[in-house]
Structures are given as C-alpha cells and as structure tokens.
Amino acid sequence: MAVNAKKVAVYVLVVFALYVIITDPAKAADYVQIAFEGISDAATAVGDFMTWLADGGN
C-alpha cells in the first residue's frame, strides 16, 4: 500500500511541475534558481563545517 501512495505522490509532483512549467515558465525558472541557490548554500555550509572540523574546531 505504501508503494502505491509513493507512486501517486510522485505522479502528482510531476504533473504539478509540468503544469507550472507550461503555464508560467518564468516563475518555474525562478523556482529552479531558488532551489539551486539553496543547494549551493547548503554545500557551502557543509564545506565550512568540514574545514572547521579539520582545523580542530577552533
């Protein structure tokens, strides 16, 4: 039963993404840019943390 719910959720997300892309491509591009900026910020934070650990936590 959980597998079917997961498939339905994935299908709903895909349909929503396609709807947003088709109806408002500029807004969809903004969403993608926001997502990539978030991923970049998270990767930078992890890198800073690892550097801090490598320096002995000072």
Image: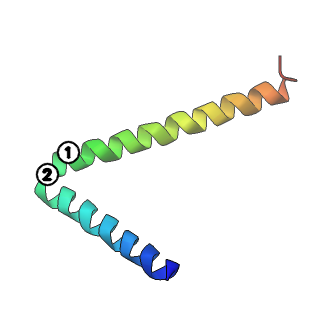
Q: Please identify the residue farthest to the left as the structure is shown.
A: 23
The residue shown at (71%, 30%) is: 49
Is residue 46 left or right of 41 when viewed as pictured?
A: right
Q: Of the residues shown, which amino acid type is indicated by label 2?
A: Asp
Q: Quadrant of the C terminus?
A: top right
Residue 30 % position (x, y): 27, 41
Which image quadrant is residue 46 in? top right
Q: Please identify the residue farthest to the front as the structure is shown.
A: 1
Q: Nearer the viewer, residue 52 or 11?
A: 11
Q: Nearer the viewer, residue 3 or 22?
A: 3
Marks 2 and 1, how far apart at CA: 6 Å
Which image quadrant is residue 37 in? top left
Count of picture labels: 2
Q: Which mark is residue 24?
A: 2
Residue 26 % position (x, y): 17, 45
Is residue 25 left or right of 56 when viewed as pictured?
A: left
Determine whether the residue tagged by mark 1 lies in a helix, strand or loop.
Answer: helix
Determine whether the residue tagged by mark 2 lies in a helix, strand or loop.
Answer: loop
- Judging by the rendered image, the residue that carries numbered circle 1 is 27
Q: Are marks 2 and 1 in contact (CB under 8 Å)?
A: yes
Residue 53 % position (x, y): 81, 29
Q: Which mark is residue 44?
A: none
Q: Nearer the viewer, residue 20 or 4?
A: 4
The residue shown at (75%, 33%) is: 50
